[in-house]
Image (cartoon, coloured by chain):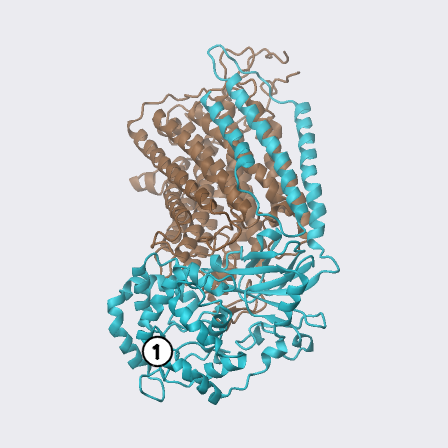
Amino acid sequence: MAAAIVLLVLVMGTVVFHALSPWYFTPIASNWSSMDSTVTLTFVVTGLAFVLVNVFIAYCLIKFRNKPDRRAEYEPESIKMESWLTILTTVGIAALLAPGLLIWKDVVTPPKESMELEVLARQWNWSYRLPGEDGQLGAVAISHTSTANPLGIDPSDPLGQDDVIIYDPVLHLKVDQPVTFLLRSNDVLHNFTVPQFRVKMDFVPGQVSYIWAEPQKQGSYDLLCEELCGVGHYAMRGRVIVDSEETYNAWLADQPTFAQTQVELSTDLAAGQAAYAVCGSCHGANAEGIESMHAPGLAHLDSEYMKRQLRHFKRGVRGAHEDDTWGRTMAPMAMMLGDAAAINDVVNYIGTLSGQVGFDGAPDYSTSNAKERTDLRALGDSKRAVALYASTCAQCHGDSGEGVWTVNAPGLAGLETWYLASQIKNFRNGIRGRHADDLYGLQMGLISNTMTDDQAINDMAAYIATLELPQQPVNLAQQK
Amino acid sequence: MEYTAHDETSFVRPAEVAEMELYHAKTWLGKYVFSQDAKTIAIQYAATAIAIGIVALVLSWLMRLQLAWPNTFSFIDPAYYLQAVTMHGMIMVVYLLTALFLGGFGNYLIPLMVGARDMVFPWLNMLSFWVYFTAVTLLAASFFVDGGSTGAGWTLYPPQAILPGTPGSETGILLMLASLAVFIIGFTMGGLNYVVTVLQARTRGMTLMRMPLTVWGIFVATILALFAFPALFVSAIMMALDILLGTSFFMPAIMTMGNEASHVGGNPLLFQHLFWFFGHPEVYIVALPAFGIVSDLISIHARKNIFGYRMMVWAIIIIGALSFVVWAHHMYVSGMNPYFGFFFATTTLIIAVPTALKVYNWVLTLWRGNIHLTVPMLFSIAFLLFFINGGMTGLFLGNATVSMPLSDTLFVVAHFHMVMAVAPVMVVCGAIYHWYPKITGRWYHKGMARFHFWTTFIGSYLVFLPMHYLGIMGVPRRYFEITGTTFLPESAQSVNESITIAALVVGFAQMVFLYNLIASAIIGKKAPDNPWNATTLEWQTETTPPGHGNFGKELPCVYRWAYDYSVPGADEDFIPQNVPPRSSRVAVAT
């Protein structure tokens, strides 16, 4: 009796939970409402079968439970009943399968008016490529991939020259424009999922897979990787923004073509030096950093990372959070740099600086490290961070803190302990990396959560200070 | 309705079964360690499987702690989490369930139920266990090597399984591959043994269509495994070659850690096809023995013949055959040619028909039965609930279109736990309680058993039912945590917390179960030879537990099927298989 009642309670509870709980699909934003309908249909048919069969079981448990004088019926089989059940089930299953197959035909055949664009996934970030005016994407190969050509486009292919490069995890789409996403991976399996679009598909390195959808509702949607791709899998986040046509076109006009990204900006070191005069008042004349001003040393920062951060400061992506006192100090300074050329000049000028107090010439990292070792003891115990650094941080920042460019992870070796500790705390407390356009920051924010308290962060900063710098300062462009 | 009395009176010519020369162990070592007695080997298999299964259970607690209270436990980092996910899955599917059903129940029950003195190749059987033990040792060793065990997910998909960025890509993955290869070698020894024993060593009168469904389930599952495991074996070897010799079976030209890797020309999808060619039948390797056993449990404890025995046998065979042509339903969004979806969605939904028929027949066996709510029966009912629930969600995921929004989410995790984790485990528990009096000669503690049942039954449902809805909301599987999204409601976290609490309670109940099993073997009440009044041969042995050679001087002779319960006109409500027919025909129709 108890078994029958509990069974009934669980079954009815399931139905009630399904009907009343607030937990269901996030509202759809694409054309695939037909997919939602098949889900609903399947819920109705299977739900009915689930309830019927279980209620029947409960009924049997009550009605035919053991009593002293009861004897079971002897009934080896009934071909008739079994045949009817077979037919009934087959009909039910066919009713579920048929609409599924019909819609699957739509899933595998993108409409003719669909616009093609490429999504490049790699550990653990997203970038995109749109065909230019010729409407075609150029050839790509792993062997062409480098910091200057991160998408690996064949420079000799004329079709690729006008391809629009979006080297950032935020993609814009035009509302009501069907899009075929061509999915390409550089390293391992990944997956393209925007929950509001319903459809999803894996990336397989060595081939291009596809999926299509027509975004029908303007808004900003999370892009997730849903195929295990390593330690950073859960932090591989992107964003898809569905715009009105005007907003979309304005955004598109701002994106560089491949040819434009290949033009090397000529560097005007003198201009950079002039611009740096402002920077030097806080960051030091040799970019050595001044802790009392909360200005980190810059000489050891990756140039690509520095450029991105300057752009973020300029656009209010970084240094806009109200608790980010020192970021807010930096933001107006970055505003003084007019354009990409100015950023390029100053970053290249910083590259010539030694990072040493009152010393011009070749950087001497050993002394710089020695300087930092004196203050890290107060901060944390480096030994406690060894395991976490190896299992987690090293996956992006490298075993010796040299940085890995494909992950967009800057080098950490040589950075000041106090600076590292304060930035990791900012990441973890949501002061840095929470801007909607700062997906790399979001990633670091998620990862920083693995340090469960301030002490763990201090330990980590202390550990990073012990990392041996590579023989040469990291010049990302030289890696490939 | 017209009844046909089953096969009691149809005469089957007793086959000649040669008495086998039994090996008699002379030393303690030969009797208890390197035993060649299938019953001892069964217990060795079961004990090893359960021991490593406890490790996997603890790993699931760690996963649940992280998911419920992310960023609280400093000892769980993303790599550790992935390692726990991977090892939990692989251990539970292969090293626990497969080994327990085939090596454990198969070894114990096949010879006893078909009326054989032992497996036909006892020495090979002994070797099979020790090879399995080696595989488990290799697997366990991977927890302790540099970099730890692999965190590539139990599917071990390349390229990430062997690249930096995935935990255990240094040594853990190699140990995993080696362990799997060794496991398969050991399994093949045992598997050939089970098949040949069923085909060649049945006692007189035990026709194939008189075998208990337990034997049918294990028999067909073993055949599946013998066909399916080689696919995993070759993929393990090929992946090991990709690691050790730098071949490129599964490795196209890629970047790794910012540099170009040396591989070129391989295909990661090839691995997925091979893996799932093994992996889908693997589901049925676990499910079919459960189907068979639960059929017998329901029939015995409802005191009624299993309804539609012939249909049940054919359903097992058809499901087994079909299970080889549905594998790519695991790959609808894998990037394979999406046109495959039409074929695999169709085959997958076809397999639902024989599966549904099995459910109907279980349920119809209860109809007009005389249901004793013993502990094994309770677990059988629980199996039905979980299996029906998981089967229904299978109709979502098998149908390519419906599966798309749900694939790679926790819905999938909830589905397969319902259908191939909790459901078979319910059968495992029911079966252990059912045969416990035969194996140990003693009763388990019934109060503890009932506590174990209720906690596991209700608790597991509370774990896995809400998990479907996390998946529907869009929570991906294998995520260390899911903060920082804009589409998930805050309340999703409360679902995660409640799941974890339920999971910890269920885990505690399994400790009670283990205690009951161990303690009752020593202090439990003595059990009679045939406490359930069952018809099958293992209950008709002269001694309990059955001695070396299983039966007395003479092997039993079988005159009827295994399901003569409540036969009209019979004195008792069961007639064992080895009871000769009466001279006059029993009532044919009522």
Tag 1 residue: A289
x and y percent of residue B60 in the render? 41, 46
x and y percent of residue A343 in the render? 50, 79
Closer-to-camera residue (A443/B335): A443
Residue under the point 70% across and 70% down: A136
Closer-to-camera residue (A166/B150): A166
- Relative to B61, A81 lies left or right: right
- Chain B painted colour: brown
Closer-to-camera residue (B299/A208): A208
Figure check: B536 above or below A213: above
- Relative to A56, B547 lies left or right: left
Closer-to-camera residue (A395/B338): A395
Per the image, label 1 sits on a secondary structure element best described as loop
Snapshot quadrant of residue B351: top right
Protein chain holding label 1: A
Snapshot quadrant of residue A382: bottom left
x and y percent of residue A152 in the render? 58, 73
Snapshot quadrant of residue A397: bottom left
Name the quarter where the N terminus of chain B is drawn. top right
- Any part of residue B192 in sight: no
Query: Which chain did the image draw in cyan?
Result: A
x and y percent of residue B403 in the render? 61, 46
